[in-house]
Amino acid sequence: EDQVTQSPEALRLQEGESSSLNCSYTVSGLRGLFWYRQDPGKGPEFLFTLYSAGEEKEKERLKATLTKKESFLHITAPKPEDSATYLCAVLGSYNTDKLIFGTGTRLQVFP
Amino acid sequence: NAGVTQTPKFRILKIGQSMTLQCAQDMNHNYMYWYRQDPGMGLKLIYYSVGAGITDKGEVPNGYNVSRSTTEDFPLRLELAAPSQTSVYFCASSYSNVGQYFGPGTRLTVL
């Protein structure tokens, strides 16, 4: 069965303090790994798609990387506006059209 | 483009009542999805559609029905509402499951 585990559940950072969020996955035939940002009371906002091990994507202070077992979302010099819940999801070949979501990491960045 | 729109934003139902959650997208996406999000549980797929006239069950379809008569619209029907259906409901769309775009959500309470 496809599974996604995100850690930590919550992370508190000082502004400028870089860190990484982890997404571990078990899936038969990874067809894509997706990162989303969700602000309180809003729908998830699409950030990145990664398709194969070794791939990296960047957007402003965020950088997503992928290995055969996990993905990391690196946050460099975060600002308070980066505070949100970050969700990871995978698309496997077994559940052909269905994303499996993790429960997210709630990030708080303090000035 | 308005993207993905959902109505209503909030709704309170009594046990046993029925209602339809509306979802529309103007991006000409072929895939559309309905999720529910409960605190600490992540996003769970209820139903999805890969095109007009085609729908399929997700992880948690019981108590819900969908239809897809046009590319743009994907309503979710709740029959005989139960307290267990209290949740936040998100509609999403994508082009062939590449990066789903979410609506703002409907917060439903069943009392």
Image (tube, grey):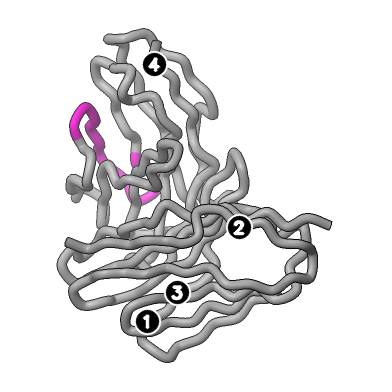
Earlier-in-chain disc, 2 versus 3: 2
CA gap, disc 1 and disc 2: 26 Å
Judge the density around disc 2: few (<14), some (14-19), many (≥20) Cα neighbours within 10 Å: some
Question: Which of B42/A99 is in front?
Answer: B42
The vertical placement of B18 against A69, above or below, is above
Residue B110 coordinates in the image, percent (x, y): 39, 16
| Element at label 4 | strand
Mark seen at residue A11: 2
| Element at label 2 | strand
Q: Are marks 4 and 1 on the same chain?
A: no
Task: Check disc 4 and report the residue beneath it.
Answer: B110
CA gap, disc 4 and disc 3: 36 Å
Residue A10 coordinates in the image, percent (x, y): 56, 53
Earlier-in-chain disc, 1 versus 2: 2
**Residues at circles 1 and 2 in contact by the CB criterion of under 8 Å:** no
**Residues at circles 4 and 3 in contact by the CB criterion of under 8 Å:** no
Q: Do labels 2 and 4 share a chain?
A: no
Mark seen at residue A37: none
- Residue type, label 3: Thr
Task: Check disc 1 and report the residue beneath it.
Answer: A51
Q: Disc 4 sits on a residue from what chain?
A: B
**Which mark's residue is nearer the viewer, 2 or 3?**
2
> Image quadrant of residue B83?
top left
Residue A67 coordinates in the image, percent (x, y): 38, 84
CA gap, disc 3 and disc 1: 7 Å
Taking the magenta stretch, the answer to whether it contains residue B70 is yes
Q: Disc 1 sits on a residue from what chain?
A: A
Q: Do labels 1 and 2 share a chain?
A: yes
**Residue drawn at 26 percent across, 58 percent down:** A98
Mark seen at residue A49: 3
